[in-house]
Amino acid sequence: MNGFSPDGYIIDQDYFDAYEYRTIPASDNGCGWIAAYNIRHYLGHDVSFEDVLHEMDAMHTLRVPGPTIMAVMRAYLHKYLPEMTEHSGRAAALEAARMSRCGILRYSEAGIPHFISFVRDGAAFRFFNVNDGLEDYACGMETFFDTHVNTPQYVSVFTL
């Protein structure tokens, strides 16, 4: 299987069509569990992507197709990363993300709600699973927000 960076981050959900998440191929809606896995990987947790996928999938009480809902993301992060803090709204999310060492950003990518993970890489950040062509992308947080977080709706960030 591909879809991983050389250092073990999941960078392309398109490669996960053999896995089911919320009753459909994870390649269609896997951004939430992928973002959670990447942060746990960054922090050195001994966890497989399959464990994250299955646990987060089971946390959804309705067995219907759909994305990761915020209540599930919050519950999963609270269980494994209780020190993460949530910030909502574009300005608050940008400021918190700028000051963090890693996080999960929820925003609208090409009009579709999307979760991505990011980790500090020197003065810049690495962003994972953004979209085709930007699977493992590095830039400043302000640049990322200026080029990708164009609407105030659905903007939240969980940071460490």
Image (tube, rainbow, N blue to C red):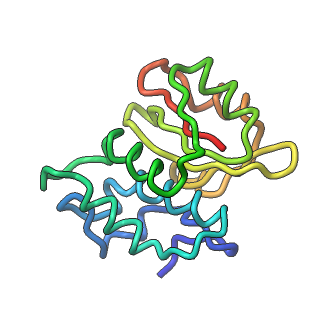
Image quadrant containing the C terminus = top right
Residue depicted at 57% across the width and 76% down the height:
46
Place of residue 22 in the rendered image (x, y in percent of width and height, measured from the top left): 22, 58
Q: Please tell me whether residue 106 is drawn above or below residue 80 in the rendered image.
A: above
Residue depicted at 55% across the width and 39% down the height:
158
Where on the picture, by quarter, is residue 7?
bottom right
Q: Please tell me whether residue 148 is drawn above or below residue 42 in the rendered image.
A: above
Residue depicted at 81% across the width and 44% down the height:
124
Is 35 or 160 nearer to us in this picture?
160
Is 54 or 135 nearer to us in this picture?
54
Place of residue 71 in the rendered image (x, y in percent of width and height, measured from the top left): 32, 40
Q: Please tell me whether residue 153 is drawn above or below residue 6 in the rendered image.
A: above
Place of residue 88 in the rendered image (x, y in percent of width and height, measured from the top left): 51, 24
Where on the picture, by quarter, is residue 19?
bottom left
Q: Residue furthest right?
A: 123
On the rendered structure, is 22 left or right of 3?
Answer: left
On the rendered structure, is 40 left or right of 71?
Answer: right
Number of on-image labels:
0
Q: Please tell me whether residue 84 is drawn above or below residue 50 in the rendered image.
A: above
Place of residue 58 in the rendered image (x, y in percent of width and height, measured from the top left): 24, 61
Q: Residue furthest bottom?
A: 1
Q: Residue furthest left?
A: 63
